[in-house]
Amino acid sequence: MSMAIANAIVQPVEREDYLNKEHGIGSWLFTTDHKRIALLYLISITIFFFIGGFFALLIRLELLTPAGDLVQADTYNKLFTQHGMVMVFFFLIPSIPAVLGNFLVPMMIGAKDLAFPRVNLLSWYLYIIGAIMMLHCMLTGGVDTGWTFYTPFSTAFTNTKIVEAGLAIFVAGFSSILTGLNFVVTIHRMRAPGMTWSRLPLFIWAHYATSVIQILGTPVIAITIVLVAAERALHLGIFDPRLGGDPLLFQHLFWFYSHPAVYIMILPSMGIISEIIACFSRKRIFGYHFVALSSMAIAVFGFIVWAHHMFVAGISLYAALVFSLLSYSVAVPSAVKVFNWTATLYKGSIHYDAPMLYAFGFLGLFTIGGLTGLFLAALGIDVHVTDTYFVVAHFHYIMVGGALMAYLGGMHFWWPKISGRLYPEGWARLAALIVFIGFNLTFFPQFILGYVGMPRRYYQYPAEFQVLNVLSTAGATVLGVGYLLPMIYFLWSMRYGKRAPDNPWQAAGLEWKTQSPPTTFNFEEEPVVTWEAYNYDEIDAGQKQEVKVVG
Amino acid sequence: MSVQTSVHQDLHGPELLHHFADPQQQRNAVSLGMWIFLATEVMFFGGLFCAYLIYRGWFFGDFAAASKSINAALGGTNTAVLICSSLTVVLAIWAAQTSRRMLLIAMLVLTMIFGLAFLGIKGIEYRDKFEEHHVPGASFSFDHEPIPGHPGQYANPQHAQIFFALYFIMTGLHALHMIVGLGLFTWLLVMAWKGRFTPAYHTPLEIGGLYWHFVDIVWIYLFPLLYLIDRHP
């Protein structure tokens, strides 16, 4: 009898949450809970991340030696094309918004769910349909045009599966539009009482700006794909100079979406970094309004810089000058963010937990990526380094060093909330370090390679480039280990990790006022917000007082 | 028992889904969602309008010659048909607001008849183009077609083919939107038949109406751009 009582006291009562409320595959495939849909996305994009990573590995292995010895030239073309398509359209663009955004946006503003839960589920199904089409396309031959589909090569010359890959991206694009639409409506209409625009977490501002790009940019690539498919199937000549068409028009339409698409990847990362830096330096973010509005400014400027991808493609000198100047303007809001984060760190009480290590990594790598972006926006340097590894290194510093680092930082930061378990901190810090070292070893040599003249998209190269290429391949191996580690210990922690308290980081933000993991409707009763965002001074002052009382 | 069930349905029916605080919030969210969707549609058609305007500027004479070959009378009739259908949509919403169920059903049916008439006329135009070999592709021909206002000059068939390619893609996508709209209105008609719409709850009618008006407005731009280039009597 007494044993039974003791057992009842020792064993924690299993609380109902969104994970254990319902069981069975149907409860996942037909769920409208934003948190479950986030997990569906998490599983899907992780699979595609490792598929894309596999292509990257083969690319780096081929480039280990100057001769083209591992794969044939045609195969190499397909490898870098599929690497780009998978990573851009099926990993990076959905990554932060569809996983962390889906999970956190309703909770951060005090809502029970997104405004349109069924549309949210539809967006995942669209993603999956696009993903299956892309998988089928890759398994039955793939595409060799590069992820950019430049015409007239893609419409009149190549014999690979352009139409199928295009349709896959078309369908996945609508999944992205629906996510953005859902976020904008949710942020406008579903905020809890007291959650004013200037009290919103910066993660929300970043997702608002991202959603605007998804809504206004994605339809343009959709119609461009329709034109390419129609031109290829019916030989129309809209983009074919032999038939009176203009291939530059394709590039304009393509980059009108695909340049802002980079901001779809980086803006949510910036939102994560704001959350992490404020929490682990225990300070209100410096210049909140400037950081919030710089997200909107990046979204707006992002739409008027696209032609800097076309400086050597034959646009007029005057257009090039204007687009060069406009491209420089993106540096202003980006710098506003970096300086404000740095100012937040100043005199902060800094904790070096794993999410913060990723945030530090982001700060350095994003700054390098951003500054080399200015090199490329300058016409003179751009002519020199166009289509070299300098460009490859630049955008990998933004997309991988920036977006992916922040995604991993965010996954660590919110993992206790998502899974209800703590990840092993020591391993996580080690993984963050390995990723940082591996990343720089992979991509810094590529800046030098590009500057001394190694062009991108070739499967062989002169022997004098070998040392730097070997460094890069070695770095890619290290990087691969760094990416496998988190996946292993996240999976491990789901079973063996310590149970997470509701707010393990003593963080501000409504999502930490829910239980870990949250219940299906997130909050027991509708929260009323009476405090400013990132009120870490109040949180920490409150705790000191509590200690005094106890002591 | 049945009373309880109906009370429960009042609380969690389509008028107020569980995650909204009150019906007003839900109405605002749904209509904002529809407006944003229309913004994506504007950008979707925007890419095509952009391509069209660039080539029209470059190959103006060829586009004018090609435009002269499509039937402006049929296009004009279609414009009138669509404007009438927009009126019936507005009347349908008014009927729902004032609880006139039979009028609502009649207006929805009329809207769909106008929509089908539009597609029928469009089909006649497409058939004419097919018979004249104006469909881009292997059997396309547009030889010795004079450029309006420039006696003795003939249109470049390749440039005219770009016009026809854009004509078919733009009107084709528009027709596809009409077909989706007809599907949407079939659903609205079923809901109206079952008496689901009340003066307090008719949001689906409003967002369906927004969609229909949007598709009309696209046509209002397509008609002059495609049919009325440099047309002289």
Image (tube, coloured by chain):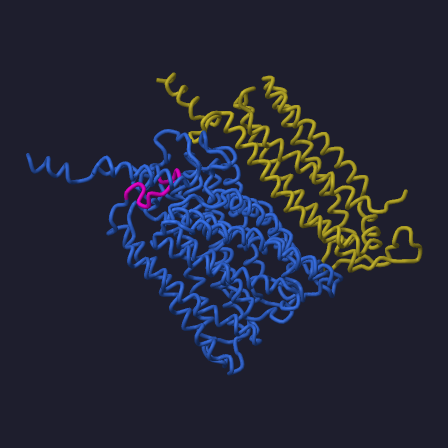
Q: Residue at x 9, y 36 (%)?
A: A4
Q: Position of residue A42 (x, y in %)?
A: 40, 51
**Residue stretch rendered in magenta on the structure:** A501-512
Q: Is residue A27 magenta?
A: no
Q: Position of residue A206 (x, y in %)?
A: 50, 46
Q: Residue at x 33, y 58 (%)?
A: A429
A384 left or right of A543 in image? right
Above or below, A239 against A287 in this view is below
Q: Colour of chain A?
A: blue
Q: Residue at x 89, y 44 (%)?
A: B232
Q: Position of residue B228 (x, y in %)?
A: 82, 44
What residue occupies the far right of the structure in this picture? B151
Above or below, A404 against B42 in this view is below
What residue occupies the far bottom of the structure in this picture? A463
Q: Output the letter for the chain in yellow.
A: B
Image quarter in which the N terminus of chain A is found: top left
